[in-house]
Every structure is written in C-alpha cells, then in structure tokens.
Amino acid sequence: MNRIGIIGAMEEEVAILKEKMTEVSVLERAGMEFFSGRLSGHEVVVVRSGIGKVNAGICTQILADKFEVEAVINTGIAGSLKAEINIGDIVLSTDTMQHDVDAREFGYAIGQIPRMDTLTFPADEGLRSLAVRVCREVNPDIQVFEGRVASGDQFVADHGTKEKIIQNTEGFCTEMEGAAIGQAAYLNKLPYLVIRAISDKADDSAHMDYPTFEKEAIRHSVRLVEGMMKAL
Ligand code: ADE
C-alpha cells in the first residue's frame, strides 16, 4: 500500500502524528488542513476531519479524489458497548454501521440506508490483522478487540441509549465518524480500518470519564497507527 490517509476527528487525535511527520506540505480543502508527508517512513496524508458523520464522509472523499490514497485509517477514541471492554482498551473494526439511520417506516432495519446494498461497511482484514500484531508489540498491556463499530451523530452518555444501540447494532464501541468513513470507503472501493481506544463506557459515567481518560486513550491509538506505518 502506498499513500495512506489517516483521519482523526479532533485535533488532539492527530496532533502527535502531525508532530512526528517529515517532508510535510499542507493543503486546505473544505475547511480541513491535509498534511502530506511521511510518518515512520511511510507516505501519509494526516487530517483532522472535524466531528460527526458528514465531516468524516467529506474528508474521506477528498482523500480519495484529491490525494488518491490507497487506504484510509481512522484513529480516535470511543465509548465502550461491552462490559469486558475497558477504558484504554482498543477496538479494531471488523465493520462499521450507523446506529442513527432509521427508515423502519419503509421496512428497513435500523442502520440500513434505504436502497443501499449493505447494512454494514466491511473493514479491511489485512489492515486489521496488521493492527492486531502491531498493537500487541506497542501496547502490550492493553486488550485488543475486533468487532463492529457503531457510529452516529450523538455523544452517548446514558444507559438507555447505550442499550438501544447495542440491541440494534451488536457494536463493540460507539463514536461519531467511523461508519461515515466506512461508507465513503465502500463507495470508493478503498480499504479502511477504524482504530478506537476506549475513553468511557457510553453510559451515565461518560461525562466524568471522557475528560479524565481522553488523553491516555488517544496515546494508545496514536502509538498503534505509528507502529503500523513502520510495519507497512
Ligand atoms: N467518543 C468517545 N466516547 C464517545 C461516546 N460515549 N459517544 C460517542 N462518541 C464518543
């Protein structure tokens, strides 16, 4: 794989990667700054998309069209949807799904975008197995899970909402961009992977845990992305 696009929703999620890049040039599109250069020797384009599905979808399309990336990696943090997935652990996407798409009125399942031929957006198995291997090396003390990432334009911070998302998606974690990146990657036939470190449990404790653990979780995810670029 040659040029790889790396998306983080928030500046905190990409700042360390940008600092570590060499041969950097910057181009602005749609209010987003795209940093082209090398990370651990590999050609990358690192960008802060902004928060939410629309920003993430637009960002992925620009990476495809303007930068002709060969794969997209999304790095960031998420709320856990499983009791055994703890703060600091990593979830790697097997696939992604939008928990806030609801066209049941027309007979579609929650998450199903009407007239699209797929309910979830399968992530790339090669990128995922590389991430599993590298994660065990660079983050030896944390657990790595492989499962579905459930995305929506919603910060999930109460038990009831969390339970509904689990029921509807069987997701391992929830965040606000992954499935939009998945959808854009699917439409462009681009391999992609979502890497999320857990910052909170997406329940009533989320508003306390999120600010406390955000930085540590970001470090886990960033370390993994850097390690993957070295290994590629
Ligand atoms: N990102 C990190 N934690 C989250 C949560 N609980 N809901 C949505 N996005 C998140």
Image: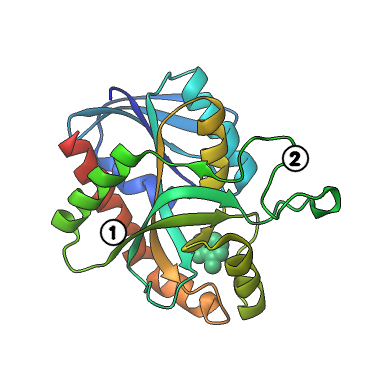
Q: Is residue 102 above or below residue 213?
A: above
Residue 175 location in percent, x, y? 53, 57
**The residue positioned farthest toward the left in the image shown:** 137
Disc nearer the start of the sequence (2/1) = 2
Q: Residues within 10 Å of mark 2 (few under 14, many from 20)?
A: some
Residue visible at 58% across and 60% down in the picture? 169
Label 1, secondary structure: give it.
helix
Name the colouring of the figure. rainbow
The answer to which of 9 and 79 lies nearer the viewer is 79
Residue visible at 41% across and 49% down in the picture? 94
Residue 129 location in percent, x, y? 26, 45
- Name the amino acid type tagged 2: Pro
Query: Is there any visible trace of residue 18 in the rendered image?
Result: no
Residue visible at 38% across and 38% down in the picture? 124
The image quarter in which residue 212 lies: bottom left
The reply, left or right, for residue 34 in relation to residue 128 is right
- Residues at circles 2 and 1 in contact by the CB criterion of under 8 Å: no
Q: Residues within 10 Å of mark 1 (few under 14, many from 20)?
A: many
Residue visible at 23% across and 43% down in the picture? 130
Query: Is there any visible trace of residue 108 in the rendered image?
Result: yes
Quadrant where the N terminus sits is: top left
Q: Indicate which label's residue lies in the foreground, 2 or 1.
A: 2
The reply, left or right, for residue 2 in relation to residue 34 is left
Label 2, secondary structure: give it.
loop
Q: Is residue 91 above or below residue 114?
A: below
Name the residue that disc number 2 marks.
114
Name the residue that disc number 1 marks.
220
